[in-house]
């Protein structure tokens, strides 16, 4: 890893973004004859050498199946794999590695919980989600509601894109069983006050799940401080590989929940008369797990934590601030999501332009953004749009790239209007 922070004359360290960029080989290429400007980090972030090297080394030097114990490679793979679990435990400040379950991603993690809590639900019970959820934190609850007779109820969002706390308080009642809420909105960038809503919900004995998919790339959650029962995130948005994610769950709840899938690894003993489950966390990890991916995710966490979060947050908020300053240079541009607490995500529309045209024409200039409904159709309905354009920034983006985005938008506007 490069030397990433340099001493500043002020108190907080600043990041050497050029050095960081050199850690991400994919960024140095040209797209459509222009230097790549990658602003689709909310969908998936790029991977540093440290992650690529860790996975490469794993496959070259230690790959075998885990927890089999019969030979040296099996031991090496198991040590690396369980070491990765400890890295995640420490990252989330969970009490025990028993509470860290590998999943395929946030989506699967939420499905594990929805399925696992189904036996607790009955007709008339209520599951609160917010209007700004990703489909991954709506649909699994709708599926479980269908099975159990429970209802999924949306907490309103304000026009600025903040969680409407009055709506939350008025919806919370003795029928509420589960509160499933996103830490950060993938469309709006809003950072929700999850700690205080969890505190309120817990007073009524409500179980709480936080969707951390968009939070972990920007700050480190502390599950004990948040007081949540479950926390879910995906590796690929946190500079790690695809195919793996994490479910944190409080041990006593995980103990009680039925397994999600059946097969190897999740069993203790199988017979045709009676099969019993393995201990935590393996009870929720049927089949051969994503071993190299776990190693890669641990490397990604080490990388991000090595950057120093305060410096990283300062660099990211400078990107968002610059983007906000430049909005007025594009007539008719409107930002969707102006919450007071935001990560560097900017959803927007431009009068007279279709979001998908903006995406295509920016791509011709080497600039990658995301367009569409962002798997958040209820939120699109709330804002009365079918989709938005979204630029989502990461720590390796530069102020110059933010400026290129706006120059690109001005060019499109000249061309199409
Ligand atoms: C807020 C949020 N939740 C859940 C997900 C689903 O993540 P994954 O597709 O990695 O399971 C995403 C992905 O965009 C997201 O932004």
Image: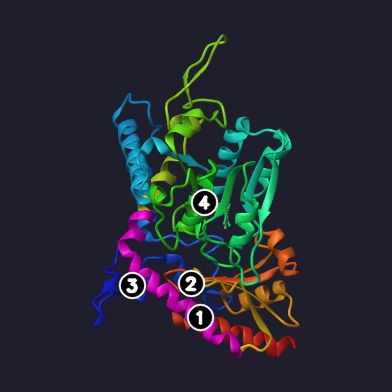
Q: Secondary structure at mark 2?
A: loop
* Callout in the foreground (2, 3): 3
Number of marks in picture: 4
Mark 3 highlights which residue?
A: 19
Question: Main SS of the magenta segment?
Answer: helix
* Towards the viewer: 225 or 3: 225
Choose the circle earlier in sequence order: 2 or 4: 2
The residue stretch that appears in magenta? 300-329
Query: How many residues crowd mark 3 within 10 Å: few (<14), some (14–19), many (20+)?
Result: some
Q: Is residue 285 above or below residue 276?
A: below
Mark 4 highlights which residue?
A: 200
Q: Secondary structure at mark 4?
A: helix
| Residue 327 picture quarter | bottom right
Q: Residue at x 66, y 89 (%)?
A: 331
Q: Is residue 150 above or below residue 11?
A: above
Residue 83 percent coordinates (x, y): 32, 41
* Callout in the foreground (2, 4): 4
141 within the magenta span: no
Residue 384 percent coordinates (x, y): 75, 69
Mark 2 highlights which residue?
A: 29
């Amino acid at each position: 890893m490069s030397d990433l922070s340099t001493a500043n004359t002020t108190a907080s360290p600043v990041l050497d973004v050029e050095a960081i960029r050199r850690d991400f080989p994919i960024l140095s290429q040209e797209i459509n004859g222009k230097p790549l400007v990658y602003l689709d980090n909310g969908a998936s972030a790029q991977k540093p050498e440290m992650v690529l090297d860790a996975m490469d080394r794993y496959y070259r030097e230690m790959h075998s199946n885990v927890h089999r114990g019969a030979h040296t490679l099996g031991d090496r793979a198991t040590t690396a794999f369980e070491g990765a679990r400890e890295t995640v435990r420490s990252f989330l400040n969970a009490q025990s590695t028993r509470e860290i379950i590998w999943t395929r991603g946030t989506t699967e993690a939420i499905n594990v919980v929805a399925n696992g809590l189904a036996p607790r639900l009955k007709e008339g019970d209520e599951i609160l989600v917010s209007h700004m959820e990703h489909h991954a934190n709506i649909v699994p609850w709708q599926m479980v509601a269908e099975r159990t007779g429970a209802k999924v109820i949306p907490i309103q969002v304000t026009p600025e894109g903040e969680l409407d706390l009055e709506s939350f308080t008025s919806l919370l009642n003795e029928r509420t069983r589960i509160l499933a809420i996103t830490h950060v909105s993938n469309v709006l960038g809003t950072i929700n006050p999850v700690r205080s809503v969890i505190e309120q919900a817990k007073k009524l004995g409500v179980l709480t799940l936080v969707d951390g998919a968009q939070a972990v790339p920007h700050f480190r959650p502390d599950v004990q401080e948040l007081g949540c029962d479950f926390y879910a995130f995906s590796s690929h948005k946190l500079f790690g590989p695809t195919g793996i994610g994490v479910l944190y769950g409080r041990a006593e709840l995980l103990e009680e929940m039925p397994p999600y899938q059946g097969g190897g690894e999740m069993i203790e003993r199988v017979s045709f008369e009676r099969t019993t489950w393995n201990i935590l966390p393996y009870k929720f990890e049927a089949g051969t797990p994503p071993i190299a991916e776990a190693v890669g995710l641990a490397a990604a966490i080490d990388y991000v934590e090595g950057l120093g979060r305060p410096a990283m947050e300062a660099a990211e908020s400078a990107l968002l601030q610059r983007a906000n300053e430049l909005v007025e240079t594009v007539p008719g541009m409107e930002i969707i999501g102006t919450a007071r607490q935001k990560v560097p995500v900017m959803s927007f529309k431009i009068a007279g332009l279709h979001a998908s045209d903006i995406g295509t024409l920016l791509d011709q200039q080497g600039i990658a953004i995301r367009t569409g409904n962002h798997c958040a159709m209820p939120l699109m309905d709330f804002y009365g749009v079918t989709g938005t354009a979204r630029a989502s920034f990461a720590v390796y983006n530069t102020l110059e790239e933010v400026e290129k985005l706006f120059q690109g938008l001005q060019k499109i506007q000249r061309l199409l209007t």
